[in-house]
Amino acid sequence: MRLGYVIVYVPDVVDALEFYERGFGLPRRFLHESGDFGEVDTGAVALAFTSHRLGGSAVPVPYTPIDAADPPVGFELTLLADDVDARYAAAVSAGATPLAEPHDEPWGQRVSYVRDPFGVLVGIATPMP
């Protein structure tokens, strides 16, 4: 097995795509004509967004939507970047909520944290040394 997708359920797929394009420089790879599913290009594993409408009909059990007003859920989406400081600034400028400014960790990574407008906890980090 291999990881194929990370899918985030959001109120508006187009808004999510536009934020990830502006905030993280991830190019749009796909948007279904319904507007209920879209992807940005992140390399081998697709980062996708599904509307709550589609998620509610596709997932066989009820789920709890992420709410930006609540504390982050126990999940982190980490995006790797060579220039964490620039990507952090771009994400905040595009509407992300700043949580931790770029800083160096003892294991050699430079990291920062934001929440996207939909409440997803996003780490921005350099690749592991």
Image: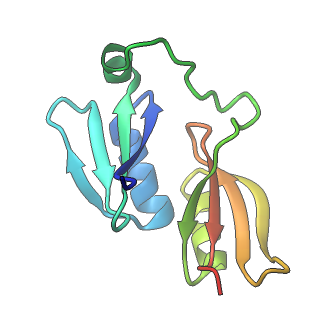
Residue at 54% x, 56% y: name it.
Answer: 94
Determine the image quadrant of residue 43. bottom left
Residues 1 and 26: in front is 1
Residue found at the very far left of the displayed protein: 33
**Place of residue 26 in the rendered image (x, y in percent of width and height, measured from the top left):** 39, 64
- As drawn, is 93 to the left or to the right of 25? right
Residue drawn at (62%, 38%), measured in percent from left and top? 119
Q: Indicate whether 49 appears above or below 84.
A: above
Residue shown at 27%/30% (left/top)? 36
Residue 15: give x, y in percent of width and height: 40, 41
Q: Residue at x 60, y 42 (%)?
A: 120
Quarter of the rendering containing residue 91? bottom right
| Figure colour scheme | rainbow
Q: What is the total number of numbered labels drawn onto the structure image?
A: 0
Foreground pick, 100 / 90 = 100
Q: Position of residue 89 (x, y in %)?
A: 63, 69
| Quadrant location of the C terminus in the rendered image | bottom right
Residue that protrudes farthest toward the front in the picture: 1
Residue 72, image x and y in percent?
71, 38
